[in-house]
Image (tube, rainbow, N blue to C red):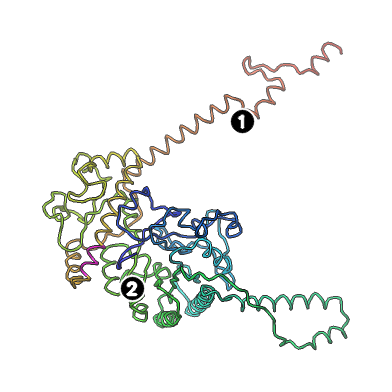
């Protein structure tokens, strides 16, 4: 169960970055987002017949990932990635969408997607959508086409979930194309008279395609994408039409097509336009809203669900969260946010100033990194500079815990009616999230350069060892020269067998 507003844990290949399963359960989140293009294998769905069967039900994705105690949310694409979410995959068609998988770009049809959903059986699946890549200019005609295509796929998916044949119209189109192709092949060897007779057949003869009985999967909730890019008219139309569909359990408000050219305020304005035309009793999710102050603005607009890509982003940068929402629970702590002079929402533990600070990240924090003062800032600074993975484990645990506490405080403020007051206080205390430039800390650059140099040295030693055993390409290329008579030790050319034979007169 997920109380809103809240987050779905961001994952990579079904695993929360840097955290072990037991630590994941300590963070206080009820759901996890799994991206299908990351976990989908090249031979799926064809290989599903080889999956093991359990006693009560099919072997599901939750069984495979050991996530049965969490709400499993599945979307096709990773729109929460720290890198650009609009990889240049090409354009979708009426027949398929494009995915960026481990083995390259892959086409996925609606039929294949339905097979995947029936086998994976997540708690929540996201309907197929025709996402438009980020560009400087988006044509309104292309935006409307993407909305129509997305709505068509949504209708088909909702029919299939009820156990009806949602793809019968597609099969009729395919059958009509097949007949047309067969007719052309047939007429190649006909005389003109026979071709005329063949053409006189009624072209409006209905294509007879029988419906196929399908397996219902009403135990899986369906979330639908609400699109429209930066066009207010298209956003309203997409929201209204999507909300009309009976059986939609939640909505995902499009932000992907906005991030290339829009500011945060423009994105929030577009989100507001969409949400105003969506039912309030159903959850609304928005990707790409990371910084706490932007989360608060989105919650005020009506967004219910976010993701944890923000604490992951901080962890990757070597930063530790200090922010809070509501009354300061750490006011007496010398390491609290209000007792710091510089940016007080987080600290960067790559900074040299933490080298000799033998205090916890945040006194009073109950995360496994801070509790009991067992890990100090100086220790984590040391771990970062020695490239120990425990550094990111501790940072991710702390940042995820603080983000969870932030949302718990927000939910309490919503209940008692203090959200607006505390949001203003948060902005006064912590200001605006500094822009993330993507540049690494100088200390991090130095560590990575040292590691690269060490790896090159190891690679060179390994190459020398291979050559010493006579199994490398270089040694194999040298061997024919030695056989030809080059005496490397004496720097002289030995006579060949033929030359010896000539001198002996044989």
Query: In the rendered view, would you say 361 is above or below 147?
Result: above
Q: Quadrant of the C terminus?
A: top right
Structural distance between the alpha carbons of marks 1 and 2: 60 Å
Count of marks placed on residues:
2
Magenta extent:
407-413
User: Which is nearer the eye, 395 or 484?
Assistant: 395
From the viewer's perspective, tell me whether residue 63 is left or right of residue 207. left
For mark 1, give the secondary structure: helix
Within-10-Å neighbours for mark 2: few <14, some 14–19, many 20+: some
Question: Which residue occupies 38% across, 51% down?
Answer: 17
For mark 2, give the secondary structure: helix
> Image quadrant of residue 295?
bottom left
Query: In the rendered view, would you say 350 is above or below 129?
Result: above
Q: Position of residue 148 (x, y in %)?
A: 51, 79
In the rendered structure, which disc, 1 or 2, sits on the residue that comes first in sequence? 2
Mark identifier at residue 474: 1
Residue under label 2: 266
């Amino acid at each position: 169960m997920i109380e809103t507003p809240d987050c779905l844990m961001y994952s990579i290949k079904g695993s929360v970055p840097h955290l072990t399963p037991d630590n994941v359960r300590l963070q206080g989140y009820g759901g996890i987002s799994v991206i299908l293009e990351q976990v989908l294998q090249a031979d799926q769905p064809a290989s599903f017949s080889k999956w093991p069967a359990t006693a009560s039900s099919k072997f599901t994705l939750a069984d495979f990932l050991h996530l049965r105690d969490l709400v499993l949310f599945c979307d096709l694409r990773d729109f929460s990635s720290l890198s650009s979410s609009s990889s240049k995959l090409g354009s979708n068609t009426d027949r398929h969408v494009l995915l960026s998988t481990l083995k390259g770009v892959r086409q996925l049809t609606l039929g294949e997607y339905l097979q995947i959903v029936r086998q994976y059986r997540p708690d929540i699946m996201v309907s197929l959508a025709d996402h438009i890549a980020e560009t400087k200019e988006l044509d309104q005609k292309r935006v409307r086409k993407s909305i129509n295509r997305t709505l068509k796929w949504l209708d088909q998916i909702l029919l299939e979930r009820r156990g009806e044949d949602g793809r019968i119209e597609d099969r009729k189109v395919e059958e009509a194309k097949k007949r047309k192709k067969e007719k052309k092949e047939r007429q190649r060897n006909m005389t003109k008279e026979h071709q005329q007779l063949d053409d006189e057949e009624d072209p409006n003869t209905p294509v007879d395609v029988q419906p196929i009985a399908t397996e219902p999967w009403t135990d899986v909730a369906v979330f639908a994408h609400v699109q429209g890019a930066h066009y207010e008219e298209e956003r309203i139309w997409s929201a209204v039409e999507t909300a009309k569909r009976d059986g939609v359990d939640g909505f995902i408000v499009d932000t992907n097509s906005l991030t290339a050219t829009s500011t945060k305020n423009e994105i929030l304005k577009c989100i507001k336009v969409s949400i105003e035309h969506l039912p309030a009793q159903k959850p609304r999710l928005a990707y790409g809203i990371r910084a706490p102050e932007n989360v608060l603005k989105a919650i005020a607009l009506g967004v219910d669900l976010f993701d944890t890509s923000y604490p992951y982003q901080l962890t990757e940068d070597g930063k530790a969260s200090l922010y809070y929402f509501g009354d300061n629970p750490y006011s007496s702590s010398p390491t609290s946010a209000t007792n710091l002079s510089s940016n007080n929402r987080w600290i960067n533990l790559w900074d040299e100033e933490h080298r000799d600070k033998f205090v916890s990240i945040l006194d009073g924090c109950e995360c496994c990194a801070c509790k009991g003062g067992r890990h100090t800032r100086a220790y984590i600074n040391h771990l970062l500079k020695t490239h120990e993975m425990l550094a990111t484990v501790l940072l991710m645990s702390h940042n995820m815990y603080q983000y969870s506490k932030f949302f718990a405080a927000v939910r309490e403020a919503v209940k008692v009616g203090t959200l607006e007051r505390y949001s203003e206080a948060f902005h006064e205390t912590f200001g605006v999230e500094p822009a993330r430039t993507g540049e690494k800390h100088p200390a991090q650059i130095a560590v990575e350069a040292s590691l690269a140099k060490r790896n090159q040295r190891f690679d060179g030693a390994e190459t020398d060892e291979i050559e010493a055993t006579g199994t490398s390409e270089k040694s194999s290329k040298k061997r024919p020269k030695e056989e030809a008579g080059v005496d490397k030790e004496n720097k002289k050319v030995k006579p060949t067998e033929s030359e010896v034979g000539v001198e002996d007169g044989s």
